[in-house]
Image: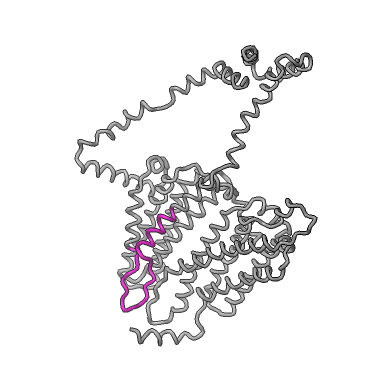
Amino acid sequence: MTTFDSKYDMYPTGDVGIVEGEMNIPGRGGVPSGDSMEFNTLDEPIKETFLRDLRAVGNKFYHVLIPREKSSLLKEWDLWGPLLLCTLMATILQGAERVNDIKDGGPEFAQVFVLVWIGAAVVTLNSKLLGGNISFFQSVCVLGYCLLPIAMSLIICRIILFSTQTTFLFFLRFAISMTGFLWATYAATKFLGDSQPEGKKALAVYPICLFYFILSWLVVSRSNV
Amino acid sequence: MTNVNTGELLNFQDYSPEHNDRSARIDVEAVHSNPYNNTMSTTSYNYEEPKMTQEPEAVPQSNHNFWTIEYYQKYFDVQTSEVVERIISSVLPQKVSRNYFDERIKGKPDMYGPIWISVTLIFTIAVSGNIADYLQNANKPIPWRYDFHLVSYAATAIMSYVWIVPLALWAALKWTTVSDGQDEIETQTSRTPSMISLFCLYGYSLSIYIPVAILWTIQISWLQWLFVLMAAFVSGAVLIFWLLPALKNTKYFIILAGSILAFHFLLAAGFMLYFFHAPSKPEIIPIITTPKV
């Protein structure tokens, strides 16, 4: 009992100044004035609401393509971009209908979909388990948005596939998807790399590489229009 | 009693931290001089203060709930250099010291290596299995298509191997270990490796199959078999070598060691035959498929 009493007594003498200093820090007053437009969305036409969200998604895509500053993607996460990219990739990558009973080994729509989301979740879980200081959905958001280079290489490869296939065109598709893979890995590493302690950075980056490599492999292997 | 003590303590708090040592010393002297006068409060205050700050840091690290991420973080507490070192020592038997398993892995087993080595192996086998399939069918008129479903087969095989075999081995070691009679319980429990460390060991022992799976794409039959034997022998030898202290205590040393090697060889041979090996008579397949069309 006596020790507790003494602990209570000792705080006011030494720490008063620090407590007063911290009272001013919480920035509750700054938030409504900066984002006041967020609170007045009831009256605006739905087109504006839609376009504003679209612009935010587009802005994030831009930052993935040119990964210079990382705060924009990490600050406000959303999963619209990942959902768009994932649906696009799954639609293009899914196996064609069986023609003449020839086995088509392409993945199903759901398989690509699950691969992307479970893969992103597992990679994120890995970085959380390694002790990285990043929230779950922030990391999933970044990983999803960084699919953009791979999705772009998929679209280019799909266009190439319309012409008659030669060995040169295969290597062209290979080079394009490898570029997409390197680009995506570079962007994701840039955004997520700093969240890990120094000795574990490679351990966190390797699963990201593996994740994008598998998706790039699917892009290369997609053949036969 | 309490009022007097707090008053004294408040006076002590007015000193700067440099004077704390001197005040503590004065208290000790006071204890010696008159033990019945406020001895408990002052001494206990001066010595309990560091304890109160240390205990909350030490306790939560060991007692995390099973369902929280923090509980599993202890299995991922490895540095990059440690993982590289473990992979290298699981591939090169001459670099392994006899007690490596006991000293390093059993004390601090990690799940990072096993999980990601397994995942890497699954996709390496799927990708290079497709390349092998392409090389086998390169000269045929039928257009070749890749098979995504190899991923599922490889995942099933590897995940079941990595989980079931260590579990069986752990059970076997646990229930067949002979007690020497004079051994105490503590040394006995430390001698049989834990479930997690066996899982860790088996995960790392798969790492040699990743380069081998790439090499299996070379479509030369005797070379493929050579790789099977080599990979199974090397990583099987490491497994036996590391588990030797635990295996020596069991009644069925030969059976256990033999079955460890046999399963390892079966896994390698199964991979090679199913994913990479061309059938010896390739003409049969078109004959069967054409009547169906």
Please state if A93 lies on the left or on the right of A49 as rendered: right
Residue B196 spot, x, y in % from top left: 61, 55
Of the pair A58 and A49, the residue shown nearer to us: A49
Is residue A104 rendered magenta in the image? yes
| Circle count | 0
Q: Which residue is found at the position 49% from the left and 46% from the top? A: A193
Asked whether, in this view, residue B42 is left or right of residue B199, the answer is: right
Does residue B135 belong to the magenta stretch?
Answer: no
The C terminus of chain B is located in which quarter? bottom left
Q: Quadrant of residue A101?
A: bottom left
Q: Nearer the viewer, residue B1 or A59?
A: B1
Side of B158 where B201 appears, left or right: right
Q: Quadrant of the N terminus of chain B?
A: top right
The correct choice, above or below, for A66 with respect to B13 in the image is below
Q: Residue B257: percent from the left, percent from the top?
A: 68, 68
Please name whichever residue, B250 or B203, is drawn nearer the observer in this view of the structure: B250
Please, which colouring scheme is shown?
one colour
Q: Which residues are magenta?
A: A92-120
